[in-house]
Amino acid sequence: MLKSVLLEELTWTDVEAAVKSGVRTALVMTGSTEQHGPHLPTMTDAAIGQAVGERLAHKLGNAIMAPVVRPGCSDHHLAFPGSLSIPEPVFIDTVVAIVRSLAPHGFDAFVLLSAHGGNFAPLERAAEQLQAEFGPKGVRIISFGGRRGLLDVMRVMNDAAAEHGLRQDADAIHADVTETSVLLNRHAKLVEVERYERGLMGRIDTDELFRRGLKALTPNGILGDPHGATAALGETVIERLAEHFATETRARLGAG
């Protein structure tokens, strides 16, 4: 049994033994370092990705999680101090490099995920490049990128909020009740509860959001509303997202 599902906590001999025992799926979670309103730290997406990815690896049972990729593609947040962003080609090259590093070690399935909205489109392009390169070699590339991937993640998170009586009337979420709840669950000391503010609600054109940037649409950097956030909801969000990805991954790999 693995002492950890996190690659960065294992020795090279641990990884070698895991692969020989049948642990051949690698999770590549991408996050960001960017503003999350006045109440959440810039590590929020990376923290959510870490929590969900680790839970997913345990659910799959034959997977190891690579370190969360960050910064991400966050140009639409750069009007807010402290936000970092890398160009799409750099992001794509980084994801591709991780797969190129691990595939020769015996990993034959890679699951590409994102906890940050700006990564979904370039993640899909990375997946296309990897499929062309590794598909003929029998390495499977499972991508949760693209517009569908983004909409599915937000749907799962909003459904989790609804389970707790906190359904949000918002087309996009950022530093909202769900993300705030995950941070309360995992990093409560970093959440500035007294700084909660309601953000942009209702109908949102996500294409316009990426084109104009968040500050043009929501001066406090929030999409949704953090009020009502709880650690219990955070646990539900982590569990629902991990189960969603686990179910889809097994189906795409033909394992259920």
Image (spheres, rainbow, N blue to C red):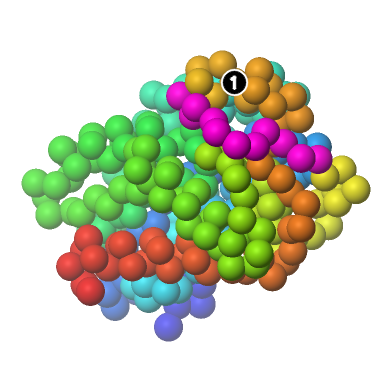
- Seen from the viewer's position, the closer of residues 191 and 66 is 191
Instruction: Identify the element where label 1 is drawn.
Output: loop
Q: Where 107 sits versus 130, above or below?
A: below
103 relative to 65 in the view: left or right: left
Q: Where 95 sits versus 2, above or below?
A: above
Give the image location of residue 196, x and y in percent: 82, 45
Give the image location of residue 31, x and y in percent: 54, 43
Crowding at mark 1 (Cα within 10 Å: few <14, some 14-19, many 20+): many
Name the kind of residue labelled 1 in the image.
Answer: Gly
Q: Where 226 sits versus 187, above or below?
A: above
Give the image location of residue 125, x and y in percent: 30, 32
Q: Where 125 sits versus 182, above or below?
A: above
The quadrant in which the N terminus is found is: bottom left
Residue found 46% across the figure and 24% down from its top: 207
250 relative to 35 in the view: left or right: left
Residue at which label 1 appears: 213
Task: Pick out the residue farthest to the bottom.
Answer: 1
Residue found 59% across the figure and 67% down from its top: 163
234 relative to 126 in the view: left or right: right
81 relative to 224 in the view: left or right: right
- Seen from the viewer's position, the closer of residues 201 and 243 is 201
Q: Is residue 200 visible?
A: yes
Magenta region: 197-207
The quadrant in which the C terminus is found is: bottom left
Residue found 65% across the figure and 67% down from its top: 164
Secondary structure, magenta segment, majority class: loop
